[in-house]
Image (spheres, rainbow, N blue to C red):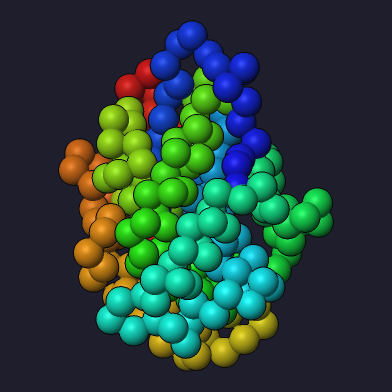
Amino acid sequence: MNNSSHSSMKNQKVPFIVTIDGPSASGKTSVARGVAKKFGWNWISTGAFYRGLAYVAKLLQIDFESEFSEKINPLIEDKLIRLCQSSLWKVQMDPENTRVVFQGKDITNFIYREEVGEWASKVSLIESVRAHLLQAQRDCAQAGSGLVAEGRDCGSVIFPKAQVKIYLTASSSQRAERRALEEGSSPDLIKAAQKARDAQDSERKVAPLVIPEDSLVIDASSMDLNAVIQTVANTVLLKK
Ligand code: DC
């Protein structure tokens, strides 16, 4: 797996990096997209790496779910690591969405379902998998003058020296309603699934979801999207 950034496009200047971490469906993607557009920067959903890996693993019948207990089966772990290194699939930055391509076919539309988020959360527990995706995530910063990276460990692990760090959250009901609306499913079911996924992402040993040091915490429960984007943009302008 590789990503779409080109080392030949490496900027001399250190890129400006904004990280946005937070629980599921807190609006990280929409805010990252909006902030990146304001400054003419790239943005990346780092969750797409885990979603893409989990989705492609399922397509290839790598059964990471039933083999998942206290410790992953080493044979399955080995297959997942080889998949992390494989050129069968790639993650591509795009102004509208972070895309995933498998064997030349764009599979982006399939990976953002809540069910795939649950698979992604499972593969993201595996330390060796995280280690193998880290460099490709960091390389996303090489392709432009700035990058907005959203996920769970962007400010804590991927870009610990980011100039601006945001922790974005919202009430669990609002987060569930947002995803339910997108998927046409029941808010109650989504709420339960998100609760389990957030607990798994926060309680894992490696790179758990945390509020990074020096981050601005934004509770978007009573804010509209533009207000959140403007708050982040103002924070960027103060640091630029
Ligand atoms: O942000 P998302 O819903 O697309 O993320 C899907 C899963 O991927 C999330 O539940 C945990 C994992 N993830 C991670 O471990 N670290 C990241 N930086 C981003 C996502």
Of residues 32 and 151, which is closer to you in this image? 151
* Residue at image coords 57%, 58%: 83
Q: Residue furthest left?
A: 213
Of residues 102 and 14, which is closer to you in this image? 102
Q: Residue furthest right?
A: 105
The quadrant of the picture showing ligand 1 is: bottom left
Seen in the picture, residue 85 relative to 194 is either above or below; the reply is: above
What is the x, y in percent for residue 109? 73, 64
Of residues 195 and 137, which is closer to you in this image? 137
* Residue at image coords 37%, 75%: 72
Seen in the picture, residue 128 relative to 181 is either above or below; the reply is: above
For the C terminus, give its image quadrant.
top left
* Residue at image coords 44%, 67%: 77
What is the x, y in percent for residue 54? 56, 68
Left or right: 235 as drawn, with respect to 77: left
Seen in the picture, residue 112 relative to 214 is either above or below; the reply is: below
